[in-house]
Image (cartoon, grey):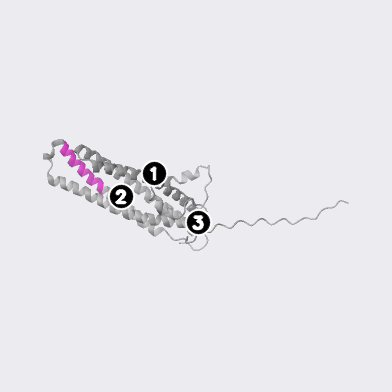
């Protein structure tokens, strides 16, 4: 007679590790208001850049007349008007840019904190770098993008699978925003220095062309930034509303 051992009860599955908790001070808060204000100022920046293009065209026309017929062909009043108008456009650009930077950083920090609630373990940089990373020389060439990628992934509602190509496709808007941001910053610095150093009419004309090209890049960068801010805000809003607990 064979012996059949009694069936042993199966061992219970090991308990799953609890999800990591966000760091102290991280809580969900709607970024919609900050996003709307940021987008509005980006739109104001586009309007000011268009004004600068018109003013730059006026300076270019005056300098062209000087090159064609000498200073006698252009009245002093016309020179003063063109120079004053271009100076005003530059002041307006600086003021709008300052306001936009402040609002954008407030929004960027807010979405970074929200992303930490969504995915506490998905961030390679601490929360403070969401603002500090923009002001550290050299590091500001890639830290903000790295933080933006972490925010984007945490706010997308799913984890990326490396090597599938999906992560690159879905970050197209983010990459376009960052590329244009770097381009407008670098090109704008070069054009501004060229204009400040120009003294001869030919050099002034060339510098004005560079500044007008910089304005066009600024407009493109602002449009893409508006799309980026709206898209990331919408992602966080949808994820917060679909998750457990109280939404925004």
Which residue is identified by label 3?
Answer: 118
Residue toward you, 228 or 17: 17
Mark 2 crowdedness (10 Å alpha carbons): few <14, some 14-19, many ≥20: many
Query: On the picture, is 164 further left or further right than 233?
Result: right
Q: Is the magenta stretch mostly helix, strand or loop?
A: helix
The answer for how far apart the CA atoms under marks 3 and 2 are is: 33 Å
Which residue is identified by label 2?
Answer: 46
Judged from the image, the secondary structure of the residue bearing numbered disc 3 is: helix
Asked if marks 1 and 3 touch (Cβ < 8 Å), the reply is no
Q: Which of marks 2 and 1 is in front?
A: 1
For image coordinates 24% across by 43% down, the residue present is 196
State the image coordinates of residue 1 (x, y, percent, origin top left): 88, 51
**Residue interval drawn in magenta:** 51-67
The answer for how far apart the CA atoms under marks 1 and 3 are is: 27 Å
The answer for how far apart the CA atoms under marks 2 and 1 are is: 18 Å
| Mark closer to the chain start, 3 or 2 | 2
Q: Which mark is residue 61?
A: none
Figure quadrant of the C terminus: bottom left
Residue toward you, 37 or 115: 115
Which residue is identified by label 1?
Answer: 179
Judged from the image, the secondary structure of the residue bearing numbered disc 1 is: helix
């Amino acid at each position: 007679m064979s012996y059949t051992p009694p069936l042993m009860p199966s061992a219970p599955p090991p308990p799953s590790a609890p999800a990591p908790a966000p760091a102290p001070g991280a809580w969900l808060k709607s970024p919609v208001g900050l996003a709307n204000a940021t987008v509005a100022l980006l739109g104001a920046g586009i309007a000011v850049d268009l004004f600068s293009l018109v003013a730059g065209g006026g300076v270019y026309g005056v300098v062209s007349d000087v090159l064609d017929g000498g200073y006698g062909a252009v009245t002093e009043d016309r020179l003063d008007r063109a120079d004053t108008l271009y100076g005003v456009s530059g002041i307006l650009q600086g003021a709008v840019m300052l306001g936009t930077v402040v609002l954008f950083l407030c929004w960027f920090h807010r979405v970074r904190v929200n992303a930490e609630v969504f995915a506490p373990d998905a961030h390679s940089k601490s929360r403070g770098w969401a603002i500090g990373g923009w002001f550290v020389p050299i590091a500001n060439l890639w830290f903000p993008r790295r933080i933006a990628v972490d925010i984007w992934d945490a706010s997308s509602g799913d984890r990326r699978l490396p090597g599938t190509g999906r992560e690159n496709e879905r970050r197209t808007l983010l990459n376009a925003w960052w590329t244009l941001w770097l381009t407008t910053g670098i090109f704008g610095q070069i054009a501004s220095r060229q204009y400040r150093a120009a003294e001869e009419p030919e050099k002034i004309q060339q510098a004005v062309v560079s500044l007008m090209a910089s304005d066009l890049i600024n407009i493109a960068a602002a449009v893409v930034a508006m799309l980026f801010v709206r898209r990331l805000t919408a992602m966080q809003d949808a994820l917060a509303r679909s998750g457990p607990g109280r939404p925004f």
